[in-house]
Image (tube, rainbow, N blue to C red):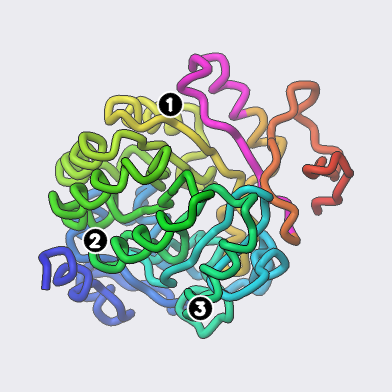
Amino acid sequence: MEKWQSEYRDSIKTHAALEEFFEAQFPKVDFPLLIPRKFATHIKKAGLDSPLANQFLPQVSENDLGGESDPIGDHNQSPLAQIVHRYENRILFFPTQVCPVICRYCFRKNELGTNDELFKANFEKVLEYLKQHSEINEIIFSGGDPLILSDERIEFYLNEFKKIPHIKFIRFHTRTPIILPSRITENFCKIIENFKKDFLQINFIIHVNHSQEFNEENKVALSLLHAHCSNLLSQSVLLKGVNNSKQALLKLIDELIKLNIRPYYLHHPDKVKGGLHFMLTLEEGRNLYATLRNHLPGWALPQYIIDIPGGEGKVSAYNPETYNFSGHLINRKGTKVPYI
């Protein structure tokens, strides 16, 4: 067993273990718990009222009944288990429903850790589907978190995808380098580097929401990943009580740039059941994003986006004409869609 696997296995997974580690009381919630102990130490140093604690420690608001179990409509765009085909030329591929940490705001928090059909093993049919759809040129590894898979499993999937001539791009969406940096080993990086000749690009989208998440160990891991894999981008979620200020976002983006990670996506939060306490209005988000535009050059400015519920997909959340919200979003077909 590798070091990172041992660290993962030793994670805090129960309410009793959480209270013992943090020497504090926490509300019992209806969602599972998982925090690697090294990262829990990082949270403890930041404090129980910090942006780190707000992201990863349970809050009583999670038991509120409002919100949606599938807020972005994954199931509406899933032609078969393990994939979502929302956009013509790319698919989301779900090789695992396991994550290195359970984020309290996660838009899939009602699906992960269950027997949801979306995550059932179905790889042979996935390959058949890809071979029948030559318009698909990109595989987006999602989940769960794909980097929680073993080197051997990731290598297996990449070997299978490289056999399909029209697959040109590979993308990994991951929180693992931040939460479990020991996972980014020399061997893993060499595997990815060896596949660079088989695809036009292999991209890693690093999920990080606040500058407090960085520490010396994960900075080393991200530098190693960049040295071998080159293309690192970021995705962040705009979260009330975590990063909904100009100062927090500018500091996060500054850290990303120092680590050779290009700011890519700033997500408006999804209306997920158990996560509504992280919501802010579109007016608030648009005003905040406008301040970023005054302080950042275009190459450092992430796209501010929102997922339209029901499976409509991502659209721009920013409106340069007015920060007021009309109650409708414009989908990819140019049709007005109500967003309440």
Q: Which residue is found at the position 34% from the left and 60% from the top?
A: 159
Residue 108 colored in magenta in the image: no
Q: Residue at x 50, y 33 (%)?
A: 245
Residue type for callout 3? Asn
| Residue bearing the label numbered 1 | 250
Q: Which residue is mark 2?
A: 40
Is residue 126 placed above or below 146 in the rendered structure? below
Residue 61 appearing in the image = no
Q: Nearer the viewer, mark 2 or mark 3?
A: 3
The answer to if 308 sits in the magenta stretch is: yes
Q: Start and end of the magenta stretch?
A: 288-309
Toward the viewer: 35 or 247? 35
- Which residue is depicted at the point 47% across and 44% down? 169
Give the mark nearer the N terminus: 1 vs 2.
Answer: 2
Q: Earlier in the sequence, mark 3 or mark 1?
A: 3
Question: Which badge, 2 or 3, comes first in the chain's sequence?
Answer: 2
Which amino acid, mark 1? Leu
Residue 17 in view of the camera: yes
Check residue 122 in the rendering and tell me which mark sits there, or answer none: 3
Give the spatial CA distance, label 1 vs label 2.
Answer: 25 Å
270 vs 238: above or below: below
The C terminus, quarter of image: bottom right
**Alpha carbons under labels 2 and 3: distance apart:** 34 Å
Q: Secondary structure at mark 2?
A: helix
Task: Identify the image quadrant of residue 97.
Answer: bottom left
**Other-residue count near label 3 (Cα within 10 Å), few / some / many at <14 / 14–19 / ≥20:** some
